[in-house]
Image: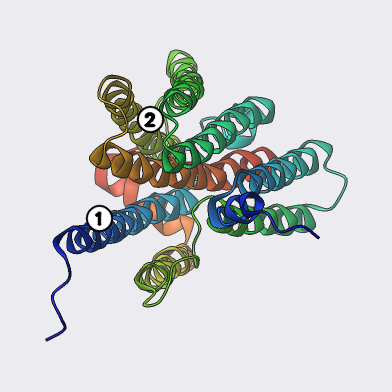
Amino acid sequence: MSTPLPKSVHNQVAQAESQDKSQLGFWIYLMTDCVLFASLFATYAVLRHNTYGGPSAHELFRPGYALIETLLLLTSSFTCGLMTIAVRQGKRQLVVMLLIITGLLGLVFLGMEISEFHKLAVDGDSWRRSGFLSAFFTLVGTHGLHILSGLLWLTVLLWNSARRGLTTVTSKRLLLFSLFWHFLDLVWIFIFTFVYMLGVLGA
Amino acid sequence: MSISAKPVVSRHHSPTSVRRYVIGFLLALYITLVAYILTVRRALSLDWLVAMIVGLALLQFVVQLIFFLHVGAETRPRWKLAVFWVMILVICILVFGSLWIMANLNYRMTPEQVTNYLHGQDGL
């Protein structure tokens, strides 16, 4: 056995180790979530031309709208990244401010996603219209649900860091949240490309 | 040259520096806009456009993995990286496997057979 460490050092080591484990655990969760999205992407890829006489992607999607959504999410991913730096530097006010900006951008993004869904449903092009639209609503809707749960998580973290400050637990969770948020941005890049851009091209 | 402690300390933030995020953000922004302009302009043939837009998405994927998710930045043993590669493998099998099988089904079940079957089933 190695020589026993002084208690304070031992605590620090244990803390660093548990931080590492929670990071790894969360990372594994993200990777399994990737597999979920991959199966939905595969479904969409198979069904994308099965419009059953209904409108095709080319007729429904507006590229400018998807671009604005992408820019919103990308910017919020960026501010979320800056937030992690502020966490590591212990700048609480900056963390709170960046969290608010990230959350607002995410909220506008979610609003745009919901308004697009609403418009489609009102025009009679809901998930019941065709296989293509079922796959579309499932894929983009699952992403929207993830964004929604991310926003709820963000609200809790915002509350915690504003009221109790950047404790060890909160800091750790803020770093995990940033992983989640970057991951959702990454998934959206593929939705933007394969659903919207290739859809508009009719490929 | 005078040796001062401060700049050295600030340079040690490098793996998570603001600069790194700014570079990643600008690259991602640039790639997104190029993909959008390619789609809207349609200056090339469809095959080329599809190839380029998919290529840009993969580039964007790598950029965000490196600059935002810091993949590969961990020290050994690299468990995160190992899990990541397994995930890539699973996704490839899932996506390309599905497309392959469904394309085969499309090929072997001609539309006539499908329509006849549907007519027989519920009189469409």
**Given the image, what chain letter belongs to the residue carrying mark 2?**
A
Tell me if mark 2 has few (under 14), some (14-19) or many (20+) residues whose alpha carbon lies within 10 angstroms of its own.
some
Which residue lies under the disc numbered 2?
Answer: A127
Tags 1 and 2 in contact by the CB under 8 Å rule? no
Answer whether residue A49 is visible to the viewer in this image: no
Q: Distance between the Cα atoms at labels 1 and 2? A: 38 Å
Which label sits on residue B52? none
Amino acid identity at mark 2: Trp
Q: Which residue is mark 1?
A: A22
Mark toward the start of the polypeptide (1 vs 2): 1
Q: Secondary structure at mark 2?
A: loop
Residue A180 is situated, as x and y percent measured from the top left of the image, at 38, 44
Name the residue type under label 1: Ser
Q: Is residue A144 shown to the viewer in this render?
A: yes
Question: Which residue extends farthest right?
Answer: B43
| Residue A172 x/y as whole percent | 30, 45
Outermost residue, top side: A122
Q: Establish if A126 lies above or below A26.
A: above
Tell whether A32 sits left or right of A202: left
Q: Is residue A1 left or right of residue A20?
A: left
Instruction: Please tell me which residue lies in front, B26 or A92.
Output: A92
State the image quarter where residue B29 is shown: top right
The one of B101 and B111 positioned closer to us in this rendering: B101
Rendering coords of residue B68 (x, y %): 53, 50
Asked if residue A55 is positioned above or below residue A174 in the image, the reply reads above
